[in-house]
Amino acid sequence: MIGPGLCVFGEMPKRFCGSGIQKEYSGVECCGFLLLKQGLWIFNLYRALYMASPSNYSTAPVSEFLLICFPNYQSWQHWLSLPLSLLFLLAMGANATLLLTIQLEASLHEPMYYLLSLLSLLDIVLCLTVIPKVLAIFWFDLRSISFSACFLQMFIMNCFLAMESCTFMVMAYDRYVAICHPLRYPSIITDRFVVRATIFVVARNGLFFLPVPVLSSRLRYCAGNIIKNCICTNLSVSKLSCDDITFNRLYQFVAGWTLLGSDLILIVLSYSFILKAVLRIKAEGAAAKALSTCGSHFILILFFSTVLLVLVITNLARKRIPPDVPILLNILHHLIPPALNPIVYGVRTKEIKQGIQKLLRRL
């Protein structure tokens, strides 16, 4: 798994992201290195489990799937391709700019901005996992996706969505300590805390969601290979199996709601304590200033939760709404939050705005 070394942030003692890499890393690089290293370990474990499966290619007649976007309204994809392309470019450009700004601006080398860089890395991976394939279907009619690529996409979507939720929870704790215990903040929220939080975010969600694609890959697919979706969701793929998929769906439901639900509860508790502490402040303007420090974070959490809630409701009410609506919302859920997250922080955070302005002057 993760090597014994740690990263260098600021003025910490000289330690390294990996034991064999003789180089110091900044906060953004270390978060990315930990994500990549943990991701490679999880993927290798998934591949080992899948290859050991008694019902892989040797017994499954399906070697690839065909993704049919909007089965009832396929004409949608022609006019959807342009706005989706623009949103994709916006998401990639905004997150890359934010990461580069945090990397180059020394004043942003703080735990709060390292957590924000982790969120941007997760957004980039989610976008690259889903949107290029969707656009390839829209533009070039490349509907086929290999058996292993489909389950890898399924794993990344489930895992990284939960990682984002967990990152929001860690960021809420960061704001709780900053407002409710400001004198202890430098000793609690340290660079080492960010490293440990990153490892926790990756390991917890990777291990919990690894069984989802493994269970799906072990099913026998004999009911065709046409997936009525633009992406390989677990529910869409498992419908094609002729095996009992009750445990498969039950595991994803329990794991998803346990992780996302616990994150949401902790976020609500953190902001409850923050609001309680702010209401006790009697100094004029101090309460507004305290709330402004976590305003951007609260907006992102609210938007993330709202989009996710709408997606869940539409999936539960499939019989009352066209089946293409949940498909569209699923695509937008992997695109709109990554596009808006860096913009909200860039507009509302003075330090990031100044850092971006300095970066543009250098160019």
Image: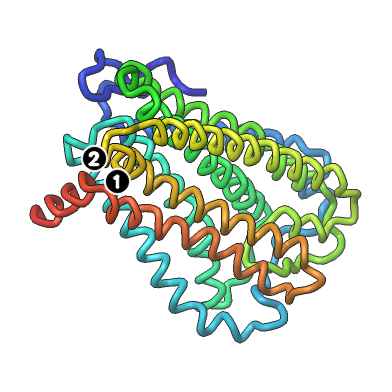
The residue sitting at 59% across, 50% down in the picture is: 157
Local packing at callout 1 (Cα closer than 10 Å; few below 14, some 14-19, many 20+) is many
Residue 69 located left or right of residue 227: left
The residue sitting at 90% across, 51% down in the picture is: 243
Tags 2 and 1 in contact by the CB under 8 Å rule? yes
* Vertical order, 174 against 162 (above or below): above
Residue 195 at x, y percent in the picture: 40, 25
Q: Tell me, yes or no, if residue 24 can be seen here.
A: yes
- The quadrant in which residue 49 appears is top right
- Most extreme residue toward the bottom is 75
Residue 37 at x, y percent in the picture: 46, 32
Local packing at callout 2 (Cα closer than 10 Å; few below 14, some 14-19, many 20+) is many
* Vertical order, 114 against 129 (above or below): above
Taking depth in this image into account, of 278 and 258 the one nearest to the observer is 278
Taking depth in this image into account, of 331 and 186 the one nearest to the observer is 186
Label 1 residue SS: helix
Taking depth in this image into account, of 110 and 228 the one nearest to the observer is 110
Residue 339 at x, y percent in the picture: 40, 60
* Vertical order, 25 against 237 (above or below): above
The residue sitting at 61% across, 62% down in the picture is: 330
Residue 333 at x, y percent in the picture: 55, 60
Residue 103 shows which numbered tag? 2
Residue 347 shows which numbered tag? none
Label 2 residue SS: helix
Q: Amino acid at mark 2?
A: Gln
Q: Tell me, yes or no, if residue 18 can be seen here.
A: no
Taking depth in this image into account, of 113 and 94 the one nearest to the observer is 113
Residue 99 shows which numbered tag? 1
* Vertical order, 298 against 81 (above or below): above
Q: CA distance from mark 2 to mark 1?
A: 6 Å
Q: Amino acid at mark 1?
A: Leu
Classify the position of the C terminus by image quarter.
Answer: bottom left
